[in-house]
Amino acid sequence: MGRNQPYSFGFADSVLAEAGGVPLDALHRDVDAICRCYEALAPVAERLGVSVPRPRLAGFAYCHVSALGAPVVFAEGSEPNVVPILHEPCDIDRLSEPGDYLQAGVIPTRLCALDALLRRRPDAHRGIGHVFEGPVTTAGLLMGPRFFTLPYEDPERAHRLLSFCGQSAINYSRVIGAYFGDAPRPCAVGIPDDFAGIFPPDVFAEFVVPYWDRFYDGLQATERHLHSELLRKEHLPFLAQLRIAVYDPSADQYVTPELLRAHCPVPFTSRILSWHIRDHAPAALQDMYRRVCACEPQSVSFYMDALHTEPKIRALLDIARQLAGETSGA
């Protein structure tokens, strides 16, 4: 291996909740619980030799769909879920954006929680979650599984919904950016759209590609990044057509680093997944990491999601630092 391999490491919300002894949903709203969790995790970070993470609200990607009217359920001890609001294709005709995004859905509650967190911890991350999902995922959240037959049953309304999802996400991103003092400007843009790969390539060409293209252009993307879990080998040529700079297959277990090295026309990232860490011994994880790096991903990421995995995470950090040129040996 003739180059240093970049990597990234982080702590999942689940290990934060475990360290602080709080239910997972508390990390979205309870400032005392959030601060306690980050304080409890600090010794773990120090033992691993990584930076102690700055507090933030729990990871969340549903502000935009919530502002469009979709209820979000924060079940105790679990991840939040979206309740679809489009039950029939004709419901699409009544969709509209809120008059004030900052007063819609869960956004006021999250802004209030963030303000309280920043008063306690001025070093906390200033944000209320991922700004948006991609147009296909947003449409799927608003309509549920039925959306994925809509291009066949009512293609005109499918196009209308995708156009609405993309443009409203752009509009919301401008509003929330202005709230945090970020003026619109040309920059690198990442789109997360995990559901897009459900469509086969012929449908993908009509109902995904143009909406991603408009999304990047609408956000003045100088560099296009994509996170999408369900693409298959047959979708990969579209990445070059879309001028994707970096493709992140995330937790997709079928799009392997070996497949991407052979067939992906653009740079890609790789991950050591949570179930790999759960099911493999430290030495086996190090061997897996070497095999992934042999495929020359742009970066390799892994996360700690449970306290008992600390020895395995330490082993991964050892090999990651070695192959990044940070240390002399694992």
Image: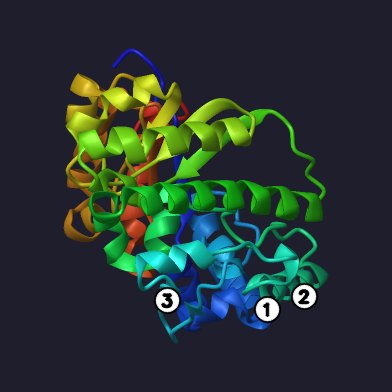
Q: Which residue is mark 1?
A: 31
Q: Position of residue 158 (x, y in %)?
A: 37, 51
**Figure check: 299 above or below 315:** above
Q: Is residue 287 left or right of residue 99?
A: left
Residue 42 placement: quadrant:
bottom right
Residue 82 locus on image (x, y percent): 44, 72
Question: Closest to the observer: 206 or 50?
Answer: 206
Alpha-carbon distance for marks 3 and 2? 28 Å
Seen at 54% across and 64% down, the residue is 95
The residue shown at (35%, 49%) is 194
Q: Earlier in the sequence, mark 1 or mark 2?
A: 1
Per the rendering, the mark at residue 116 is: 2
Question: What quarter of the picture does the N terminus occupy?
Answer: top left
Structural crowding at the residue carrying mark 3, measured as other residues with C-alpha within 10 Å and reported as few (<14), some (14–19) or many (≥20)? some
Q: Residue at x 35, y 70 (%)?
A: 88
Is disc 1 in contact with disc 2, using a CB cutoff of under 8 Å? yes
Q: Nearer the viewer, mark 3 or mark 1?
A: 3
Circle on res. 83 = 3
Q: CA distance from mark 3 to mark 1?
A: 26 Å
Task: Decide: few, some or many residues near mark 2? Use Cα within 10 Å; few <14, some 14-19, many ≥20.
Answer: some
| Count of labels in the image | 3
User: Disc 2 on helix, strand or loop?
Assistant: helix
Question: Which residue type carries mark 2?
Answer: Ala
Q: Amino acid at mark 1?
A: Val
Query: Few, some or many C-alpha atoms within 10 Å of disc 1 (few <14, some 14-19, many ≥20)?
Result: many
Q: For this rendering, which residue is in front, 281 or 124?
A: 124
Q: Earlier in the sequence, mark 3 or mark 2?
A: 3
